[in-house]
Image (spheres, rainbow, N blue to C red):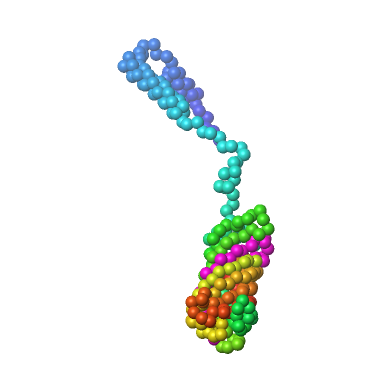
Amino acid sequence: MNAIIPREVLIQQRNWRYATKQFNPERKSNPEGWGALRERMRKTILFVMVGSALATSSEGAEPELTPAPAVPTSGQHEAFAPQPTGIWQDGIGSGFRKNTMQSGFLVGGGFGKSAFGGREAHDLSLGAANAGWILTDVIGKDYFFKGNLEVIGELFGGAEFHPHTRYLTGVNALLRYNIATGTRWVPFLTCGAGLTLTDIGHPDLSGTFQFDPQGGVGTHYFFRENVAFTAEWRWLHLSNAGISEPNHGTNTQMFMGGITWFF
C-alpha cells in the first residue's frame, strides 16, 4: 500500500516548487553571457550557409550521365553473348572452336594396285600416331559444307606383307577439312605428303628415301563429347620423284581405324 503523506509535508513541498518557479524581477542577466550566446549563434548560421553553398556547387560539378540505351546494339550483343566453352562452337557436331587440339592413333592395312605405272600390287600393314591443330573457326556457315581447317603431323610405321616382306616408316604433314553436320558424325577430307624410308626396292622403287603423296576421306564418330572413333580411307603413293631408277611407284588403298582425343 502507498504511504499517506502528512498535510504539513505536502504544503511545504508545494511552497518550495512555487518559490523556484516564481519570477525574480531583481535578478539581471549577465551582458557578457548574452554576447557570447550571440557570437555562437552567428558562427552557427555562417557555418550552415557555407556548407549549403559547397554542397550545391559540388552537385553542379558532377558530369551528366548518359542513360544506357533501352535496346542493346549489335556490338553489345556480341560482348555480352555467352561464350562457347570446350571444343565445340555450339554443341557436338556444330564445328570445332579455333585452336582446338587433337591427338590419336590409327591402325590398318591396305591392298596394293598395279596402277599408274606400277608393276606389282604392294599390300601394306601400318600403324600411325598423329596430332592436330584446328586452324580456323567454322567457315562457310551458310553452306552445307561448313567446317574447320586442320593441320596434322603424323608418324607412321609398318610393313609390306605382299608380294614381299619389307619395312617402311616415315612422317607426314596433312591438311584436313572437318565438316560440321550438327550430329555426332564429323566427316572429313584429308590430303598431304611426307617422307618414307623403305626397302621395298625393285621392280617398282629404288633407293631408301621415297615421297608419299596421299589423300582420302574419313569420319569421326563422337561417342563422348571430346573422344571419337575415327575411320579413314586413303590412297597412298610411294615414289622418289625420279631421283633414281626404277621409279614406277607403288599405289595402295589404305583402310585405317582408331581413336582420337580432342582438347
Q: Quadrant of the C terminus?
A: bottom right
Q: Nearer the viewer, residue 42 or 244?
A: 244
Q: Nearer the viewer, residue 70 or 138?
A: 138
Q: Residue at x 42, y 26 (%)?
A: 54
Q: Residue at x 60, y 73 (%)?
A: 259
Whether residue 50 appears in magenta in the rendering, the answer is no
Give the number of marks.
0
Residue 180's x, y, as percent? 64, 61
Query: From what the image shows, is residue 40 above or below residue 180?
Result: above
Query: From what the image shows, is residue 135 above or below residue 117?
Result: above
Direction from residue 13 to residue 226 in the image, left or right = right
- Residue extending furthest toward the bottom: 164
Magenta span main SS: strand
Q: Quadrant of residue 150 in the image?
A: bottom right
Residue 183's x, y, as percent? 68, 63
Q: Residue at x 31, y 16 (%)?
A: 32
Query: From what the image shows, is residue 117 above or below residue 29?
Result: below
Q: Nearer the viewer, residue 170 or 237?
A: 237
- Tell me which segment is drawn in magenta: 166-186
Q: Residue at x 56, y 72 (%)?
A: 213
Residue 160's x, y, as percent? 57, 84
Residue 23 shows up from this direction: yes
Query: From what the image shows, is residue 22 above or below residue 225?
Result: above
